[in-house]
Structure formats: C-alpha cells, structure tokens
C-alpha cells in the first residue's frame, strides 16, 4: 500500500499515466485506480488481486532486508573497531572519553548509508514487483533483474539510491545512538550493583563468624600454595 500510494502522485497525473500506459493499451487491461487513502488502497488491492496482491514482493523484501541488516551491523562493528584502533595509534594519550552515543550517531549513519547503497538493486526489484498491479511486467525477482539489466543497465538497478541513502543515514544514526545509550545505562547499573555487593563483604567478615572462618581458611590455603 505504501509503495503504490507513493508512486501515484496526484489524481490527475495518475489518470494521465494510466491513459498513456502502452502496456494497458496493448493488453486491454487497466492498471489499478487512484487510492484516496490507506484503507481504500488495501480494500481495492484485496478485491482486485486477493491476499496475494497484498503480499506482492514478500520474498524480494526478505531478500533486501536480511542482507541490509547483516551488512549494517557488520559495518558498524568494523567501524567501531577501526575507530578504537585509530585512537590507540594516533591519540594514545587522550584523556577525554568520547561519548558512546555520539560515536553511535556518526558510525551508525555511515554504516546504514553504505549498506543502503549496496542493497539498492534489491530495493528496486522489490518496489517494481509491488507497484506493477494487475498488469504483470515482471513474473518474479529473477525476471525483474534480467529485464532491468537488459533494458536499463546498471543505472536502472541503482535508481533511487540517493533518496534511499538519505533516508537510512538518519534512521540508522538514531538507532545506533539509542543502542549505545541503552548499553551505557545498563553497564552503569551493572557496575553499581557489583560495587554494592563488594562493599557488603567486609561487614559480613566482621559480623558473621562463618565469614571470618572462611577468610582464615583462604589465608591458610594461600600460605600453603606459596610454600609449594
């Protein structure tokens, strides 16, 4: 529904596109009409194409999102390691600690933008399968790759790469900034909990006779290991 409502533009321009569509004129079929809203789009697709129309491009969506997510996380971790290595080599005496959330903002944006560009061909295939409607231009993902490559070349497979990158850079940056912020908060609470547990040990040794006996036993073991 999102893809079709985005490509249709205004009602006048969409009706003009349907009239000028050479495939519609040759086959006698009409493309889907103008969608005035989300619910009207969903009901129209369901009526014209059934549930299969609502799930058009499902496998191509998986083929896009799984590699994208894997690449983004892999590149982010690689950039983090590279940043740490660079700080140790170029500024080893740096006393000021850079906030992890700030690093997540910049490195996450880079990782998301680069991953979005590399997976643009998969996004093009997914989008074309989803917006073709009842007039079948592509019979599947492989057919879409073959026809786009033959007719439009490499440029056709990377159409829309700039808007896609522009979309994913801020989205990925904010995502990894939030991840690093939550990670820092969790680690701080974990460290505070460990410190509180450690601070209670001396009181147990002084007040609990069992703790005192255990402490003496550990000293005896250490003396024997030293002699050995």
Image (cartoon, rainbow, N blue to C red):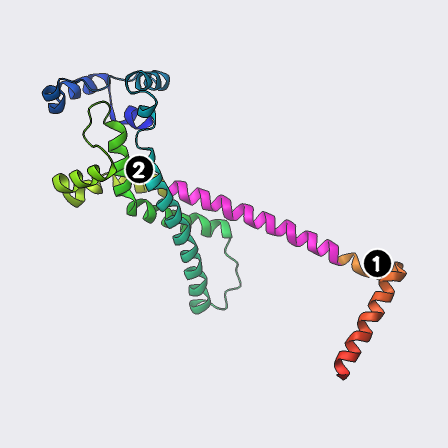
Query: Taking 156 as reference, is 196 left or right?
Result: right
Q: Is residue 60 magenta?
A: no
Left or right: 114, with 27 as reference point: right
Q: Residue sitting at 64 percent across and 49 percent down?
A: 189
Q: Residue at x 87, y 61 (%)?
A: 210
Dot 2 falls on a residue whose secondary structure is: helix
- Quarter of the image with the N terminus is top left
Residue at image point 32% right, 20% down: 50
Say if 208 sits above or below 63 in the image: below
- Give the alpha-carbon distance from disc 2 to disc 1, as whole Å: 62 Å
Which portion, as a residue range, is magenta? 170-198
Mark 2 neighbour class, 10 Å CA radius: few under 14, some 14 to 19, many 20 or more: many
Q: Which residue is mark 2?
A: 60
Q: Which mark is residue 204?
A: 1
Depth order, front residue of 83/137: 137
Q: Position of residue 221 (x, y in %)?
A: 79, 74
Q: What secondary structure do most residues of the magenta stretch adopt?
A: helix
């Amino acid at each position: 529904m999102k893809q079709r409502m985005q490509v249709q533009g205004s009602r006048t321009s969409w009706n003009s596109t349907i009239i000028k569509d050479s495939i519609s004129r040759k086959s006698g079929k009409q493309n889907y009409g103008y969608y005035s809203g989300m619910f009207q789009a969903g009901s129209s697709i369901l009526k014209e194409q059934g549930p299969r129309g609502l799930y058009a491009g499902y496998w191509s969506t998986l083929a896009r999102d799984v590699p994208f997510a894997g690449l983004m996380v892999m590149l982010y971790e690689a950039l983090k390691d590279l940043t740490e290595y660079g700080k140790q080599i170029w500024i080893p005496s740096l006393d000021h600690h850079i906030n992890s959330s700030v690093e997540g903002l910049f490195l996450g944006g880079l990782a998301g933008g680069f991953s979005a560009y590399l997976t643009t061909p998969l996004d093009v295939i997914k989008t074309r399968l989803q917006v073709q409607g009842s007039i079948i231009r592509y019979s599947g993902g492989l057919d879409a790759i073959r026809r786009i490559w033959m007719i439009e070349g490499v440029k056709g497979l990377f159409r829309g790469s700039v808007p896609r990158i522009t979309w994913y850079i801020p989205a990925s940056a904010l995502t990894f900034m939030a991840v690093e912020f939550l990670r820092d908060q969790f680690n701080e609470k974990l460290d505070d909990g460990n410190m509180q547990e450690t601070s209670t040990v001396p009181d147990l040794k002084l007040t609990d006779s069992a703790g005192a006996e255990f402490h003496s036993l550990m000293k005896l073991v250490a003396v024997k290991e030293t002699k050995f």
